[in-house]
Image: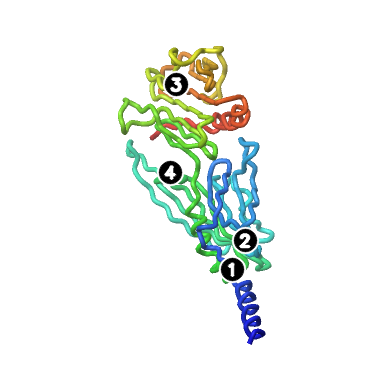
Amino acid sequence: MMVSRIFCFLLLICTVLALPVIADQKSNWLVYHAASFDVSYPANFTVLPSLKSSWSAQRYDSVYFVSPDAKIKFYATTNTEDKATDIALQPAAETLVSTKTEKKNAMGDNDDEYELYRYTWKTIRAKDRRYIRALVIVTDGRDYRKYDQAVIGIQYADDASYQQYRKAYLHFKDSLKARIYYGGSISVVYPAGFTARPSLRNGDTRHGSVLSVFFTVQDNKAEFYVFSPWTPAENATDYQLRPDTEVLISESKKDEHSSFFDMSLCTVTRQRIRAKDESYTRIVLDIKQKDDISLMNHLTFGFKYRDQQTYIRYAEDFQMLQKVTLLRCWD
């Protein structure tokens, strides 16, 4: 009787160990922070960063996630397809099996037609039939809260493997979210771990176009700021020196050619401001085109930090924020 129970127990263990990996349980997922997006992936998958970011030394623009049995690979990037070179068709080793595109156009404010969204699905097979790749290439301006462009894919060894991880892949695909804040006249890619908080609005109305935004790290030790007005009459009133609580430590002003405004001549002002109670320091970088009264001729960046250690930790992120802030001509 005892031998029989032991045999049954061992049989149960062997049966459990032989079961496939449960890849669709959402309770055991991690989040990968790429250069400009976040995506969730199963915790037992291996992370393989791929294309290095051109503006972040420590982040990547694309990434693969490999299943424990190596039969599945997930892929994600918010690059456009032409820049996603690591997912491109390899003619010597692969064949394009099928492609399908769905798109829709809409009319703009000036009765000009533009593409509202485009989805392209591609199926690629290895010539030696070792795997199949399924890709979806997205350009979608309807929901900036997630992303407006992306390439998402899955590579699988066979149909059984695909069915095993299908639910996990759908969750992975749905979790992709770009860390891009779209304001009235700017698009800002902000670092992982920061939260965006809009501040000034055009016309000082609740629903007006956003002119300025704060990005605050979770522990409140660092905060970034971006201001981009529509007109020269608008100023960064939410980031000016506060004489009652702050003191100006240093200030420099000179004319420089700025890449933000097609290398035109700008007045660049740099300030360092410290709280009187020494609880923080602020860096202010103000860039304004000279002799230009056109729309969107002014940018202000700010970096508030608690101490020198915090400054060192987030200085690169502040540089990145400036590199990937884009001026836009629509809301």
Quadrant in which residue 165 is drawn: bottom right
Circle 3 residues within 10 Å: few <14, some 14–19, many ≥20: some
Q: Nearer the viewer, mark 4 or mark 2?
A: 2
* Residue 272 x %, y %: 55, 17
The answer to whether the residues at label 1 and label 3 have Cβ atoms under 8 Å apart is no
Q: Which quadrant does the C terminus fall into?
A: top left
Q: Distance between the residues labelled 1 and 3?
A: 54 Å
Query: As rendered, which of 4 and 276 lies closer to the eye?
Result: 4
Query: Left or right of 93: which side holds 217?
Result: left
Residue flagged by tag 2: what amino acid is it? Ser
Tally the numbered discs. Answer: 4
Above or below 140: residue 74: below
Residue 161: assigned label: 1
Residue flagged by tag 1: what amino acid is it? Ser
Q: In what element is the residue under mark 1? A: helix
Residue flagged by tag 3: what amino acid is it? Tyr
Query: As rendered, which of 106 and 140 lies closer to the eye?
Result: 140
Circle 4 residues within 10 Å: few <14, some 14–19, many ≥20: few
